[in-house]
Image: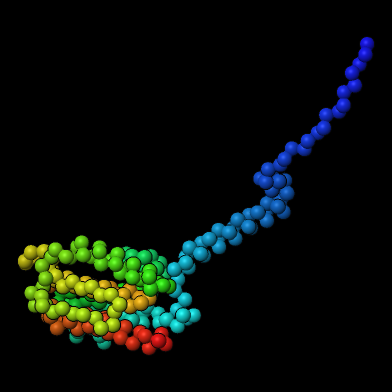
Amino acid sequence: MNSIAQSPKKVVPKRRSLLALALARPVVASALLLGLVLALLCGLAFWVTRDYVPFEEMGLPMPREFLLTPADVPQGWEQDFALYLRRYPSVFLPGVRVESYVSFKSERAQGSVSHTVGARAAPGYTARSFEEEVAFRGSLYDALPAWPPLVDWGYVSPHADQYALWIVERGEPPDAKLVVMAIAQYEYYVSQLWLEGDPQLVTPEDVQQLIAAADAKFAHLAERMGK
């Protein structure tokens, strides 16, 4: 009987997956894990700092330097004064990640005030933040009646690139509230001043002083930036 000689089959080694290789070799597993951790940390750092304003490198003042202080507010308004700095998204200004915020109250006028200042690394971003906030506030305040004592006071900021102001009454007497909202863009910065109080107890002079004081904080911005 003739036998047919068969050539031996060529053995092809199985391709091992990266996971199997890592499990078989602890050194490889450790290197892969370390690389994954480093990649995650780098991604997180980029996400956190992508909108961080390098104030020192750019010669920019910190946002907190523009906040109202007790010396800027009407006498008797500084009953509860709080200041803190935040570096995370806030509900106060859209798209602004670096902010400072101060608030205070007046027992005499049954009112409260907040002042928020944020910054972005490019004026285009702050302009967009200003526009978004104005559109949002306009939907809330445009239809409300103006506060009679200041209905003809058309304040125009001499310092801001863009400025919007509402001085209105919300609700019906005797529960009506005076609401003041001033939003401004000063190149890299966005400022928001908010006031709410009893329209029978808040004086027009108090409102005018607060609005002018918040705006005046940016009077010398160009000089401080070396322009």
Nearer to the camera, 167 or 115: 167
Counting from the top left corner in percent of width and height, residue 152 is at 10, 78
Counting from the top left corner in percent of width and height, residue 178 is at 14, 71
Q: Residue at x 70, y 52 (%)?
A: 28
For this view, does 198 lie left or right of residue 19? left
Quadrant where the C terminus lies?
A: bottom left
Snapshot quadrant of residue 130: bottom left
| For residue 205, above or below residue 143 | below
Instruction: Pick out the residue farthest to the right.
Output: 1
For this view, does 87 lie left or right of residue 184? right
Q: Residue at x 29, y 64 (%)?
A: 132
Snapshot quadrant of residue 17: top right
Nearer to the camera, 28 or 93: 93
For this view, does 128 lie left or right of residue 203? right
Residue 172 seen in render: yes
Q: Residue at x 34, y 67 (%)?
A: 128
Q: Residue at x 20, y 73 (%)?
A: 165
